[in-house]
Image: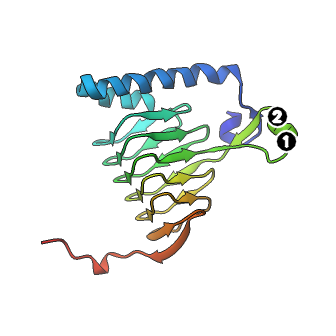
Amino acid sequence: ERMLAGDWYVSDDPDNHAISARADRLCAQYAVAWVEDRDRCGEILSQIFGSVGEDVCVKPPIAVDYGENTTIGRGTFVNFDFTVLDVAPVTIGEYCQFGPHVQILTPVHPLEPSPRRAGLESADPIVIGDNVWLGGGVIVCPGVTIGDNCVIGAGAVVTKDIPASSLAVGSPARVIRTLDDSTFRPRR
């Protein structure tokens, strides 16, 4: 509960080990099911994450801190090597597309050496809106909100909120233009 409130807490708290170990077991089971028994994948995915919408596809491997603090909206596709450190809540909208090696990171560690050495950390929630595309290798940092209809370029490190319908690239990610559908022409 302290983690979700953003207060400092000891990261090596034994109470958290059981939740994390459960998540690790489920992620391993999911990877096996992906290869051997795809019919079980939806069931396992819904056990890993707090909430999973319809028609969600997450390619293994997956690594999560707890899993239960993450929700994924319907129609979302996540490519392989997805990492979610969901010490605080992570909300992923509907119809998102994530490239490989995306990292969603909620933990915050102290800048000062003494509290960091003592193992203190806190966490800030992350919100990713609907219809967002995160390119391969994108890292989303603690406390960030990415608005609906955004595209975040491959390799970007998102350290600040990104307004809806924006294209952001770089490290740190910067908005380089606004996106709109008025110029969309379907391929023929």
Q: Residues within 10 Å of mark 1 (few under 14, many from 20)?
A: few
Three-letter residue code for mark 1: Pro
Three-letter residue code for mark 2: Arg
Name the quadrant containing residue 160: bottom right
CB-based contact (under 8 Å), mark 2 and mark 1: yes
User: Which residue matches tag 1?
Assistant: 113
**Residue at the image position 50 percent from the left and 68 percent from the top:** 168
**Residue at the image position 29 percent from the left and 80 percent from the top:** 183
**Residue at the image position 62 percent from the left and 21 percent from the top:** 17
**Residue at the image position 33 percent from the left and 23 percent from the top:** 32
- Answer above or below: position of 161 versus 3: below
Figure disc tally: 2
Quadrant the N terminus occupies: top right
Label 2: which secondary element: helix
Q: Nearer the viewer, residue 161 or 83?
A: 83
Rounded to the nearest whole Å, what is the CA distance between mark 2 and mark 1? 6 Å
Q: Residues within 10 Å of mark 2 (few under 14, many from 20)?
A: few
User: Which residue matches tag 2?
Assistant: 117
Label 1: which secondary element: helix
